[in-house]
Amino acid sequence: MTDAKPQKYTAPALEKGLDILELLSSTDAGLSLSEIARVLGRSVSEIFRMLVVLQQRGYIAQDPGSDKYVLTTLLFEVAHRTPMIRRLTTVAAPLMRDLAHQTNQSVHMGVISDDTVLIVGQVDPPARHVMSVRLGTRVDMWRASSGRVIMAYQSEEELADMLRRAPLPEGVDQGRLRADLIEIRKRGHEVVDSFVVKGVVNISVPIIDHTGHAVAALTVPHIERIGDTVGLADCCIQAIDIASKLTRSLGGGVAGRE
């Protein structure tokens, strides 16, 4: 929500609107008018006026069954208008489709947004049984392969700042995480069991810009099916090749491989 630090300039109406958007982004089920007012410590009347405007502009919608307010996809669409993401998703789309069809595995691309991994690209394979992440999903970056490989290609200052803003969840050791990030950078990618779903092995490769920093990650949540002709090792090679092409499109170097 709002920053507690002293601010030289304020725009109360804008701050209220942003508070509402940030609050709704943290819930899947949506919130009612009274719930939003209570959490933000505002009166129902002032929150109602903001909700009306946000709804008229298309940023939120009201569930007719529960009267709860939820975010629409407009914020996601606005984010995609930024030059870097628009360029990257445009270039990545056909390559991701090829990779999904060649490996018969789902493919997604994530970027860091508000200290979480935001899925900005997603392609399913022709197979009946797939493991995919919905477009627009946000995932805790420290538990996501995409987040880990992106963080592995940040400066120490940027990594320390990220750790300060988004503390590690309980049970995750910072020393172990840092060691993992060093290994990921040495290897140029990560192949690791999913942190969320048993039986899924994530292949995640950074997409690096001209500064040497990772701006996104290409990830294949690999599942093993009976009769698949492309195994995990070949899938990994193909994912690295696609990520390397995307890296070159941004003027970066080629991601390493084992």
Image (spheres, grey):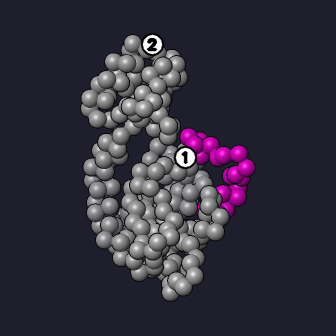
- The secondary element bearing badge 1 is classed as helix
Residue type marked 2: Ser
Residues packed near mark 1 inside 10 Å, few (<14), some (14 to 19) or many (20 plus) = some
151 or 212: nearer the eye? Answer: 151
* Outermost residue, front side: 65
Residue at 33%, 67% in the rendered image: 92
Q: Which mark is residue 162?
A: 1
Front residue of 165 and 118: 118
Residue ID for mark 2 = 43
Q: Position of residue 20 (x, y in %)?
A: 42, 28
Q: What is the CA distance from the residue labelled 1 to the residue labelled 2?
A: 34 Å
Magenta residues span 162-183
Q: Which amino acid does label 1 sit on?
A: Met
In the rendered image, residue 57, in percent from the top left (x then y), is placed at 26, 32
The C terminus sits in image quarter: bottom right
Task: Give the structural element (helix, strand or loop) at label 2.
Answer: loop
Q: Is residue 173 shown in magenta?
A: yes
In primary-sequence order, the first of circles 1 and 2 is 2
Residue 164 in the figure: left or right of residue 254: right
Q: Could you tell me residue 95's position as x and y percent?
A: 34, 73
Rate crowding at label 2 as few (under 14), some (14 to 19) or many (20 or more) other CA atoms within 10 Å: few
Q: In front: 35, or 186?
A: 35
Taking the image as drawn, is residue 205 in sight? no
User: For residue 186, which quarter of the picture?
Assistant: bottom right
The residue under the point 49% across, 52% down is 117
